Each structure stands twice: as structure tokens, then as C-alpha cells.
Image: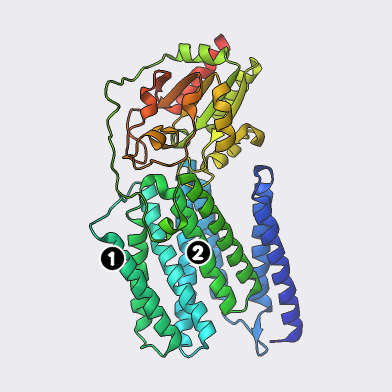
């Protein structure tokens, strides 16, 4: 490689790596997240174009730029269109698809290198095989996650599934070790790909809906690790840094999600989620549901000192985040203190509610994390639950037979009055009935979240 080109290329990779780190840090706060995303994207653009125009091997530059720019143009068109038309309710599905594409790219890179250079040194073969295994599992697992999040695939499990999955994983590792240590037959890599694909499907298929945020963050970390393997393989500092950042951030997020869901990391890695949906789907014996009128709800909120809003997936489905923010402002004009209680796994992906409310320009200080919110419920006059279900279900604390038992929840039952907005009494994503709905302090307000909030705003203004 020409020394001058190599030197400039190394500098651009360093610049790109710095932008990745800076962008990731800025993503940690809603006020700077958009800017951080743009900075990281700019760094990626620098790395891509620097590679296209500056990389050369033995003084020979890339000769297939037309194909490269054709692929870039097609990707830009598809990505831009998808980002513009996607609804907020479909954001988790889009994240899963994009994550799966990253895993597929890493797996394809590993496949090409394995078929072209079967006699690579063992360290390089380790990177190739690791990228192949992790990337393929991430791809097939992410596609199944997309299907489940979009309602196209149901939770599926069968007798002995864990044993089969673990045996399959052991086989995958054994074949991978054979590929690293010796000259495996040419068809071995395709057998490995097929087994990894099947394992990715079996890994995600039985996972219960309440655990989906955990598996999404885990698959995201898989994709990052697979990309880092590619960066090591090509000695590409930018690719290596980006992969490590994504992998480590995804792993940290997975651990935090596990804590929020009361799952151990080992439980996640072996695919032993709460796939078995047991528990009573009926309400408690002797319990009954109480309905409330819009006028009564508006009156109660208008004369409260503190109102806590608990957003959930139903709010996202109704695209009611802006209307919710309008209700918040109307109540504050009447002197009511309004805050939001955010459960870490509310919605269908980590941070779903934070993204939803940030889109509506809700001030970040108003968004209370679970522990902070739980400390304030006892001093809250009215809690308004908007489309949340499993994350406020007391069965997580009281019913050992419930599939969500042990999951930390928002202690909304400690508030003086609870108003729950839902379309129907249908169960949540975990497939169980919510005991909160039968609490004497709870009143139901049925209807589409956006329509109900609009009517509440009118009623509050009239009081």
C-alpha cells in the first residue's frame, strides 16, 4: 500500500473512531442524541469514502467502485424510505430488521474470506469463524424477532427444545473449532451456516413477549461483535472500533434489561426465557372492573396536586404522544405537577417510551426512571396509565405462578387514584390478565388513547 495513502487513511479511521465514541456518548441524553447520531453518521461516511478512494494494495486502488456506489445508492434509497414511512409503533420491527442486516453483512464477509482463504493463520480463522457464527445467529434471530414484534410469528416451543438448542450450539462450536484447527472440507462452512441459522431461529422463537426488549439488545450486541471480528480480520481500525462500541454498549444494555426483567444473563444466553406462559388469564375471584366517565377523570386530574403518567405500547399504537404532551401542558396551567413514570422495558424495545416522548418534546427531567417513580407514587394523587399493561401488573410481586413473577414493576397501586386507559380488556404482550384493573382504586377509561386524551383536554379546559 502506498505510504502516503496509508497514512491519510489511518488518520481518517482515527477521526471516524473518535466520532463513534463521541456520538455514542451523546446518545446517552435526549437533548444531544440527535446531534450525536449525526456526528457518528458523519464519521461513518468519512470512513467509507476514505476506504473507497484511498485504500490500495500494492499500489493498486479499488477497481470496482461502480458496483460499490451502486450498492451505496440502493442502500441510501431503501434506508431513507424506510426511515421516513415507518410509524413509531413499527420502530422496534425496523430496529430488528436493520440489526439483522448488520449480522448478515458480517456473516457474508466471513463466508467470503473463509472460502477464499481456507489456509489462513489460526488467529485469523478464529475471527472468520466467530464472525460467521455470531453474524448468522444475529441475522436469523433478528428476523424472527421482527416477525414476533409485527405479530406475524407467535411464540413457539416444544418438549426438549432447550436440550436440542444447547446440543445444536455445542455442534456449532465443535465444527467451528474444527474449521479453525484444520483444513475442513469445502462444504463444512455451508453446514455451519445452516446450523447457525437454525439455532438463531430456535433461540428467539420461544421467547415470551415481555422479554423481547432483552433479546433485541442482546442481538444488537451480537451484531457489534460480529462487525468487530470483520474489523480485526481486515485490520480496519474504524470497523473494529465501531463493532466494539456497538457490542459493548449492547452487552451493557442487555445486563441492564436483564436486571429490569429479573432475568440472569446466563438465562438469556441459553435461551431460557419465560416461554411457558402459565398463570390465570382471568381476573381475581370476586374482582370486578370499574369504569369512569371522561368528565370524572378530567375533574379528578384538574384538582390534583400531582399527576403521574405511565406510557405504554398502547400510547405508541395510537400515536398519542403529542396529545399526551398537550394534556400535560393544560394540567400545568392549572397548577398541577405532571411527571412521567418510565419502565425500562415498556413498549417493544429498550428506551421505546423515551424515544416516543422525546419526539413530542416532553422535557427530559419530567421522565422518571422506575426507581425514582416508585419513590413518588405514594405522594401522587392520580396515576394515568396509557396503554401500559405488564409493567404495572402487581402479579409480578404477588403471584408466583405468573410468567412475569419477579419482574420489577412500577408500583402504581400506591397512588391515591388510578385511571387506566385501554381499548379493551384484552391481555398484554405477556398474555396474562392484569390484577391492577381489579384494584378498588382503579377505574377504567376505555377507548383509543389519542381520542380519549383529546376529549380529556377539552374537559380539563372546561373545568
Q: Quadrant of the C terminus?
A: top right
In-image side of 89 versus 460 (left or right): left
The crowd level at tag 2 (other Cα within 10 Å; few <14, some 14-19, many 20+) is many
User: Residue extending furthest top?
Assistant: 463
At numbered mark 1, what does the secondary structure look like: helix, strand or loop? helix
Residue 75, percent from left and from top: 52, 62
Q: Can you name the residue that lies furthest to the left here?
A: 159
Up/down of 8 relative to 213, above or below = below
Residue 212 percent coordinates (x, y) = 42, 49
Residue 391 percent location from the top left of the image: 45, 36
Tell me if 399 is positioned left or right of 79 in this view. Answer: left
On screen, residue 354 above or below 379: below
Q: Earlier in the sequence, mark 2 or mark 1?
A: 1
Q: Residue at x 54, y 16 (%)?
A: 301
33 left or right of 86 in image: right
Along the viewing direction, whichever of 134 and 1 lies nearer the viewer? 134
Residue 318 is at least partly visible in this image: yes
Total numbered labels: 2
Q: Secondary structure at mark 2?
A: helix
- Judged by depth in the image, the label closer to the viewer, 2 or 1, is 1
What residue does disc 2 label?
223
Tell me which residue sits at (53%, 27%) in the image. 309
Q: Is residue 370 above or below residue 192?
A: above
Q: Nearer the viewer, residue 356 or 61?
A: 356
Residue behind mark 1: 164
Relative to the observer, which residue lies in front, 343 or 10? 343
Q: Quadrant of residue 96?
A: bottom left
Q: Quadrant of the N terminus?
A: bottom right
Q: Position of residue 437 (x, y in %)?
A: 37, 25
Residue 320 seen by the camera = no
Whole-angstrom CA distance, mark 2 to mark 1, is 24 Å
Amino acid at each position: 500500500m502506498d505510504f502516503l495513502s496509508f497514512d491519510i487513511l489511518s488518520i481518517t479511521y482515527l477521526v471516524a473512531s473518535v466520532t463513534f465514541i463521541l456520538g455514542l456518548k451523546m446518545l446517552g441524553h435526549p437533548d444531544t442524541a440527535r446531534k450525536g447520531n449525526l456526528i457518528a453518521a458523519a464519521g461513518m461516511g468519512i470512513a467509507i469514502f476514505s476506504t473507497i478512494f484511498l485504500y490500495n494494495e500494492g499500489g493498486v486502488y479499488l477497481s470496482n467502485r461502480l458496483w460499490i456506489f451502486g450498492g451505496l445508492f440502493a442502500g441510501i434509497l431503501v434506508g431513507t424510505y424506510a426511515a421516513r414511512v415507518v410509524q413509531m409503533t413499527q420502530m422496534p420491527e425496523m430496529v430488528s430488521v436493520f440489526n439483522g442486516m448488520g449480522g448478515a453483512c458480517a456473516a457474508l464477509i466471513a463466508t467470503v474470506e473463509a472460502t477464499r482463504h481456507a489456509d489462513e493463520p489460526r488467529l485469523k480463522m478464529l475471527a472468520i469463524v466467530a464472525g460467521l457464527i455470531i453474524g448468522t445467529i444475529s441475522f436469523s434471530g433478528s428476523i424472527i424477532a421482527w416477525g414476533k414484534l409485527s405479530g406475524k410469528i407467535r411464540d413457539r416451543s416444544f418438549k426438549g427444545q432447550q436440550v436440542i438448542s444447547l446440543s445444536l450450539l455445542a455442534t456449532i462450536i465443535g465444527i467451528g473449532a474444527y474449521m479453525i484447527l484444520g483444513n475442513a472440507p469445502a462444504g463444512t462452512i455451508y453446514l455451519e451456516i445452516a446450523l447457525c441459522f437454525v439455532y438463531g431461529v430456535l433461540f428467539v422463537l420461544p421467547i415470551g413477549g415481555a422479554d423481547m426488549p432483552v433479546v433485541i439488545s442482546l442481538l444488537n450486541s451480537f451484531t457489534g461483535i460480529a462487525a468487530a471480528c470483520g474489523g480485526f480480520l481486515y485490520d480496519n481500525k474504524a470497523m473494529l472500533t465501531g463493532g466494539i462500541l456497538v457490542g459493548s454498549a449492547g452487552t451493557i444494555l442487555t445486563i441492564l434489561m436483564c436486571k429490569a426483567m429479573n432475568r440472569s444473563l446466563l438465562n438469556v444466553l441459553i435461551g431460557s426465557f419465560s416461554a411457558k406462559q402459565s398463570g390465570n388469564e382471568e381476573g381475581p375471584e370476586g374482582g370486578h372492573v370499574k369504569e369512569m366517565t371522561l368528565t370524572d377523570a378530567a375533574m379528578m386530574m384538574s384538582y390534583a396536586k400531582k399527576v403521574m403518567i405511565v406510557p405504554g405500547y398502547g400510547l405508541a399504537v395510537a400515536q398519542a404522544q403529542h396529545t399526551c404532551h398537550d394534556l400535560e401542558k393544560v394540567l400545568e396551567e392549572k397548577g398541577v405537577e405532571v411527571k412521567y413514570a418510565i419502565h425500562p422495558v415498556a413498549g417493544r424495545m429498550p428506551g421505546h417510551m423515551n424515544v416516543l416522548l422525546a419526539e413530542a418534546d416532553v422535557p427530559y427531567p419530567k421522565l422518571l426512571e422506575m426507581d425514582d417513580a416508585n419513590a413518588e407514587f405514594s405522594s401522587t394523587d392520580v396515576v394515568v396509565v396509557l396503554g401500559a399493561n405488564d409493567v404495572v401488573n402487581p402479579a409480578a410481586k404477588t403471584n408466583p405462578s405468573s410468567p412475569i413473577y419477579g419482574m420489577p414493576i412500577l408500583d402504581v397501586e400506591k397512588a391515591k387514584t388510578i385511571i387506566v386507559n385501554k381499548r379493551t380488556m384484552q391481555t398484554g404482550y405477556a398474555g396474562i390478565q392484569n390484577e391492577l384493573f381489579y384494584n378498588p382504586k382503579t377505574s377504567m377509561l376505555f377507548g383509543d388513547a389519542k381520542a380519549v386524551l383529546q376529549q380529556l383536554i377539552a374537559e380539563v379546559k372546561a373545568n
